[in-house]
Image: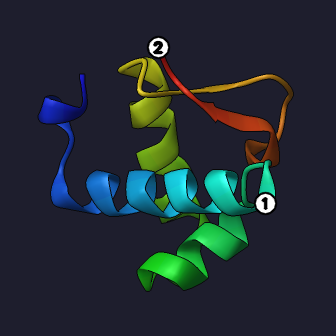
């Protein structure tokens, strides 16, 4: 699944993977944006929605902090 991601989405995925490995939970949209160099939270949310639709990540709750890596 990850082979269909854009470069920006791969950067987001690396950021999320590293953060979850270190802290045990996902980041907020603002934290992801700061980590990958995006100031627009809507741009980050757009990328995350596409990654979720592709099955690369999932959420257990409404916000992105509950983000988990997909199957």
Q: Residues within 10 Å of mark 1 (few under 14, many from 20)?
A: few
Residue 50: percent from left, percent from top: 40, 33
Where disc 1 sits, the SS reads helix
Please, which residue is most extreme toward the front here? 22
Q: How is the image coloured?
A: rainbow
Residue sitting at x 41%, y 27%: 56
Q: Which residue is mark 2?
A: 71
- The residue wearing badge 1 is 23
Q: Is residue 30 left or right of residue 32?
A: right
Mark whose residue sits in front, 1 or 2 = 1
Q: Quadrant of the N terminus?
A: top left
Determine whether, in the image, residue 36 is placed left or right of residue 3: right
> Which residue is more in the foreground, 70 or 29?
70
The quadrant holding residue 39 is bottom right
When asked about the image quadrant of residue 55, the answer is: top left
The numbered dot on residue 55 is: none
């Amino acid at each position: 699944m990850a082979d269909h991601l854009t470069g920006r989405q791969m950067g987001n995925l690396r950021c999320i993977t590293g953060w979850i490995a270190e802290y045990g939970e996902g980041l907020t949209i603002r934290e992801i944006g700061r980590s990958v160099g995006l100031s627009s939270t809507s741009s980050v949310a757009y990328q995350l929605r596409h990654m979720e639709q592709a099955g690369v990540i999932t959420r257990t709750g409404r916000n992105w902090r509950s983000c988990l890596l997909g199957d």
